[in-house]
Amino acid sequence: MNLIDLLAGSQNNPAVTQLARQFGLNPEQIRDVIGQVAPALGQGLARNTSAAGGLDSLINALQKGSHSRYVDQPDSLGQADTVQDGNNILGHILGSKDISRALAGRAGASTGISPDIIKQLLPLIASLAMGSLSKQTTNAPQGNQISDVLGSLLDRNRDGSALDDLIGMAGKFLGR
């Protein structure tokens, strides 16, 4: 399962339905936005986890944070503290507001949804990503390491290596 599948989930994903209702969109539009922004989030996560101490920091955040509430209680996606948490997550994953704005612009151009709406969705999608990763790693069999779970989420073509997928995501993200 990759990050896009994890975030968008099934056809009746309650979090997708909540976001659609919250922003006056339909669930398919939310899935389209997720499909556009998840590669950049995955790329940022991969970059952060490959830096010194990055994987430990992510594991700590997944274990100590209560991010799974965003998946378990989708109505929490409408709360101000979720937006704040999501903006903090985006800051860690993407590094700057300029990158977030550029991502919203590209996603808007691809989906036909206003970049302003996507800017509002980004922190909620980031919160949902952390919640999904938290649940996925918590539910992993005892023998699996969190890094194995994260690697499998980022390995979009399931060839056993996330590196080629991350390079492809980077190319799309940078518009090449």
Image: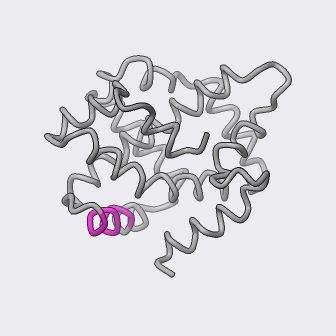
- Taking the spot 48% from the left edge, 52% from the top edge, the residue there is 38
Residue 122 horizontal/vertical position (percent): 36, 49
Dominant SS type (magenta): helix
Residue 115 horizontal/vertical position (percent): 24, 61
* In the image, farthest residue toward the bottom: 176
Colour scheme of the picture: one colour
Question: For residue 127, which quarter of the picture?
Answer: top left
The N terminus lies in quadrant:
top right
> Magenta segment, which residues?
103-110
Residue 76 horizontal/vertical position (percent): 33, 23
- Taking the spot 27% from the left edge, 63% from the top edge, the residue there is 108
- Taking the spot 51% from the left edge, 23% from the top edge, the residue there is 68
Would you place residue 92 above or below residue 81 in this image? Answer: below
- On whether residue 107 falls in the magenta region, the answer is yes
Q: Nearer the viewer, residue 133 or 36?
A: 36
Question: For residue 112, which quarter of the picture?
Answer: bottom left
Q: Nearer the viewer, residue 13 or 66?
A: 13
Q: In this rendering, would 60 be left or right of 174?
A: right
